[in-house]
Amino acid sequence: MTFSPDTYARALDFAAEAHGAQRVPGKQHPYITHVATVAAEILAVATKDSFDVELAVTCALLHDTLEDTSASEDEITRLFGAAVARGVRALSKDTRLPKEDQMADSLARIQREPREVWMVKLADRITNLAAPPPYWSREKRIAYREEARRILSALGPASAPLASRMEAKIEAYGDYIEGAP
């Protein structure tokens, strides 16, 4: 297992600066709490599996910077290397595509990357399977759970511990559907 606290700190600082005042949807938490939680999911399985922890954690911390901020792929390449930049690019939706095609495209691009990138997408969705924003309709919650199942089916082979955790989160997410408006 390779892991550098210095790289973690640099990536966390970069993400915090890039995300600025953004908030977690439906909450008042600074957005940086989301990316730190995704990285924690990766770190939690580091003792159960052998993988490039530094690549996975760095991609986890930066996974939304291209999609949600003004950060550039060139900047990420310069600061964190080409492998991290490719991973972050794969984890970013291509907003030029119709919304209904974006996830399939992203999953296909993720599957062309090392398994560490697959693991980040699993960890991201695990984190996002917490309580949805209260304004989400029942239909949106059902669709979100179905999308999670699609992600698990496509990327689950990357990590048995993350796949198992995601299965449990998908099951528990049913509680948020039953009481939805």
Image (cartoon, helix red, strand yellow):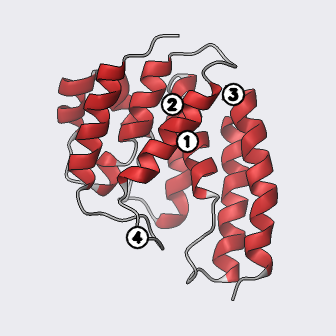
Q: Which residue is mark 1?
A: 121
Helix, strand or loop under label 4:
loop
Q: Position of residue 6 (x, y in %)?
A: 29, 21
Asked where in the image residue 111 lies, by quadrant, the reply is top right
Q: Amino acid at mark 3?
A: Ser
Q: CA distance from mark 3 to mark 2?
A: 11 Å
Q: Amino acid at mark 4?
A: Gln
Q: Position of residue 15 (x, y in %)?
A: 29, 44
Q: Which residue is mark 4?
A: 28
Helix, strand or loop under label 2:
helix
Residue at position x 79%, y 60% in the image: 172
Residue mark closest to the camera, 3 vs 4: 4
Q: CA distance from mark 4 to mark 2?
A: 28 Å
Left or right of 11, for residue 104: right
Residue 93 seen by the camera: no
Helix, strand or loop under label 1:
helix
Task: Give yes or no for contact between labels 3 and 4 (Cβ–Cβ under 8 Å).
Answer: no
Q: Which residue is mark 2?
A: 117
